[in-house]
Image (spheres, rainbow, N blue to C red):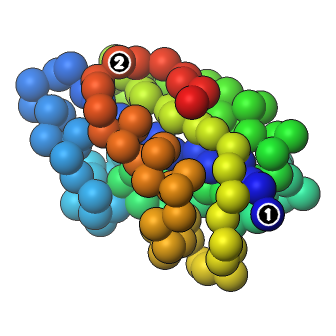
Amino acid sequence: MEYGVIYQRLIPTESYLSWIKYCYLYGALPILLQEGIKKMVTTINEEYKDDIIVPMGLHAQLGCIVTPNSVNKIAEALFGMYSVMLNSLDVQPNIRVVYSIGEIKNINVDSIHQVAPDKIMVKVGRYLDSADDIGIFKI
């Protein structure tokens, strides 16, 4: 069955935050960023609960699996909320959100990071890591 896949990555330009681009551990992030991510994840998971198949978890790089018809609006919401949160912390909102629609065989997982490497998951992950361009990218 086809689903929407969304992944996000923070690409800070501030030299003291540049390591975050390579961070995968939520607990290693600065406390204010952890708090902002937690609030944002909770808001998105609640606001779009009817459209989210595998909700966002608390990770340094966020992602979720959603219904195909909601993938664009949730990707835009993620980008917008993350931008607002970073601006409130006086950090440049350099965010890369990549999304696509494709077949996923097993969605019975607790986190997008536990999904088997189906073709769509690899496609989105590779594109996410392929460049540092900022914005929302549909592939």
Tell me if mark 2 has few (under 14), some (14-19) or many (20+) residues whose alpha carbon lies within 10 angstroms of its own. Answer: some
At x 69% / y 58%, what residue is drawn? 103
On the image, the x and y values in percent for residue 72 come to 74, 31
Q: Point out the tag, 2 or 1, that comes first from the N-terminus.
A: 1
In the image: residue 6, left or right of residue 8 = right
Q: Is residue 84 above or below residue 38?
A: above
Tell me if mark 1 has few (under 14), some (14-19) or many (20+) residues whose alpha carbon lies within 10 angstroms of its own. Answer: few
What is the quadrant of residue 89 in the picture?
top left
Identity of the amino acid at label 2?
Answer: Asp
Question: Residue reaching furthest left?
Answer: 15
Closer to the camera: disc 2 or disc 1?
1
The quadrant in which the N terminus is found is: bottom right
| Local SS, label 2 | loop
On the image, the x and y values in percent for residue 90 come to 34, 21
On the image, the x and y values in percent for residue 34 come to 39, 53
Q: In this view, does 72 lie above or below 135?
A: below
Q: Is residue 113 above or below residue 69?
A: below
At x 31% / y 39%, what residue is drawn? 129
In the image: residue 42, left or right of residue 37 = right
Q: Which mark is residue 133?
A: 2
At x 60% / y 27%, what residue is drawn? 138
| Local SS, label 1 | loop
Q: How many labels does the image show?
A: 2
Q: Report if the CB atoms under discs 2 and 1 are less than 8 Å apart.
A: no
At x 52% / y 34%, what residue is drawn? 98
User: Is residue 102 at all visible to an observer of this figure?
Assistant: yes
Q: Residue 1 carries which label?
A: 1
Identity of the amino acid at label 1?
Answer: Met
